Amino acid sequence: METSKNTTKSEVKLTDPVICYPGHIKKCSKISKTARNILDIILIIMRIDNHVYLDIDAIYNIRQLSTTYQGKNYTEQTIRNAINELSKNELILKYKNKNYFVNPTFFIKFSPEERRHKLLTGLVEIGAIKIE
């Protein structure tokens, strides 16, 4: 898979889990099925810091992934419309030009190491683990 200009291959790991917070269901119910499908792909390609660069290369990758994993063959314009809809509904937040952040209020991505650290930190904070 090609990666975009501001993202290196080491930063995009398709195996990193995405955590969906409870409020995402209500927010996602307001968008079209196509926009939801595109959001699913964006969640796959976003970096751990929730950044996604949506240039023409990324749109091509979204088309390829949606064809492979969803059996959908979206046009470039359909994907752009879905990106605009996601931005309008604040599921993705436009930063500069083609730089977006997936709204961390609804979705975050962890590397396995970061997930382990956060789990252990959470257990320490609630007193489940005693550190000596």
Image (cartoon, helix red, strand yellow):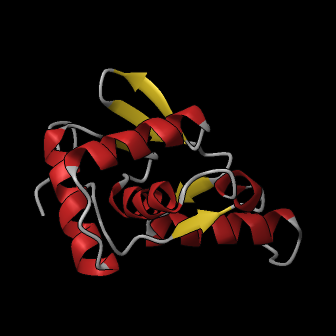
Q: Nearer the viewer, residue 128 or 40?
A: 40
Q: Locate residue 111, reporting x and y percent.
A: 44, 65
Number of numbered discs present?
0
Residue in the picture at 26% in, 59% down: 74
Q: Locate residue 97, reporting x and y percent.
A: 31, 21
Q: Quarter of the image containing the C terminus?
A: bottom right
Residue in the picture at 52% in, 62% down: 33
Q: Locate residue 109, reporting x and y percent.
A: 50, 60
Residue in the picture at 21% in, 37% down: 55
Left or right of residue 60: residue 17: right
Residue found at the far top of this picture: 96
Image height of 53 relative to 27, above or below: above
Choose top left, top right, bottom left or bottom right for residue 22.
Answer: bottom right
Left or right of residue 125: residue 58: left
Q: Nearer the viewer, residue 19 or 31?
A: 31
Image height of 66 relative to 88, above or below: below
Query: Could you tell me if residue 8 is visible in this image?
Result: no
Q: Nearer the viewer, residue 35 or 131?
A: 35
Residue in the picture at 45% in, 28% down: 94
Image height of 70 relative to 4, above or below: below
Query: Could you tell me if residue 44 is visible in this image?
Result: yes
Q: Nearer the viewer, residue 103 or 70?
A: 70
Q: Locate residue 89, reporting x and y percent.
A: 61, 38
Choose top left, top right, bottom left or bottom right for residue 95.
Answer: top left
Q: Quarter of the image containing the N terminus?
A: bottom left
Choose top left, top right, bottom left or bottom right for residue 26.
Answer: bottom right
Left or right of residue 129: residue 53: left
